[in-house]
Amino acid sequence: MNRPSNKYWQNRFEILTESLLNKADRHYAELIQEYEKALLRIQREIEQFYAKFATDNKITLAEARRLLTAKELKEFHWTIEEFIEKAIESSLDQRWVKELNNASVRVRISRLEALEYQIRQEIELLYAKRHEGLMELSKEITTEGYYRTIYEIQKGFGVGDTFGLLDTRLIESIITRPWAPDGSNFSSRIWRDKQLLMNELQKVLIQSFIRGDAPDKAINYIAKTMNVSKRAAGRLVMTESAFFANNARERAFRELGVEEYQFIATLDTRTSEICQDMDLKVFKLSEKQVGVNWPPLHPNCRSTVAPYFEGNIVERWARHPETGKGYRVPGNMSYKEWYSRYVG
């Protein structure tokens, strides 16, 4: 039987991982645009706030904490009703919907609180998109990573055999299961990031009023805070994507009886020392530990793994296709053809 070299597997799985992580890059580029749109809307709200309440282009903290007049309170309630409608339509966090409902009947509210509600609505909408986007990306990477791994191994040996299919419920259970050392999943990390951002924005606003900042300066501080959150979002997207790409690979390895794997680092100027030291080391799949000998080893980790068959060709790969136990996988069979025939 033709046995592909380990160099072959390294090359194929590096290309596959790069393809999957490119999806994460494109998703993050779209997420950056969402951050920029949210910042523009927050900027307009702050500018309108200053236009309405500022004296000499400045607002003191005492002025910001003044209660809304009866007319302003009525306008605020109208705005909150619009927020509630949008929150329900966008499936925002029910805790936020409850807060909005409570705000809709409040009779005493300050100018600062009204502004904070406006900013909070933008953050809730932004983070709902973050969560939905990462959920869909994780599903896509998990599904494609699993089936492409099986395809690559079967094509490499020219022989295919039966394998389990992923259904929607299984995929959702995979991507919602906590894997990080702190026991959290990406949903809880996104929620935590949202709380941190909102707390920081509130602090920045109050400090701006204490200093008597002009609106452009206040907006600049807000933008810096949003940029910190944006970078954190990027780390989360890339790290979670790396985990799900490799997690899908592990499932495919176990499905096909792969017993050993080789750690493959992406060697360039950005490669961490720990990944450089792990490059080409071979481990038993039964001893795999995420963050120790299985990627990701750190945030933004781009390392991957490949099957290792040196002296360890599982018997199923020795089956001759003419025995009827399996099927041929021609070298010119594309992934789409294979998927259509054996998956979809």
Image (cartoon, rainbow, N blue to C red):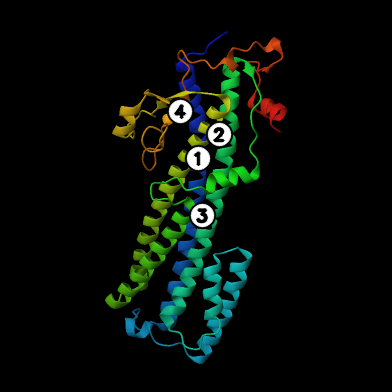
| Residue 35 screen position, x and y as percent | 47, 57
CA gap, disc 1 and disc 4: 16 Å
Dot 3: within a 10 Å radius of its alpha carbon, few (fewer than 14), some, or many (20 or more) residues?
many
Per the image, the residue denoted by label 4 is 285
In the rendered image, the vertical position of residue 3 relative to residue 228, given as above or below: above
Which mark is on residue 244?
1
Instruction: Identify residue type, mark 2.
Output: Gly
Q: Earlier in the sequence, mark 3 or mark 4?
A: 3
Q: Quick one: label 1, few (<14), some, or many (20+) residues within 10 Å?
A: many
The relative height of residue 111 versus residue 88 in the rendered view (above or below) is below
- Confirm or deny contact between disc 1 and disc 4 (CB under 8 A): no
Residue linked to disc 2: 145
Q: CA distance from mark 1 to mark 2?
A: 8 Å
Residue 215 drawn above or below residue 140:
below
**Mark 3 vs 2, N-terminal side:** 3
Q: CA distance from mark 3 to mark 4?
A: 33 Å
Query: Residue shown at 33%/68% (left/top)?
Result: 217
Say which element carries label 1: helix
Residue 323 in which image quadrant = top right
Report whether 128 appears left or right of 325: left
**Residue denoted by label 3:** 130
Kindly identify the residue that appears in the image at 47 percent across and 69 percent down: 120
In the rendered view of the protein, which quadrant contains the N terminus?
top right
Amino acid beneath label 3? Arg
Where disc 2 sits, the SS reads: helix
Q: Are marks 1 and 2 in contact (CB under 8 Å)?
A: yes
Labels 3, 4: front one: 4
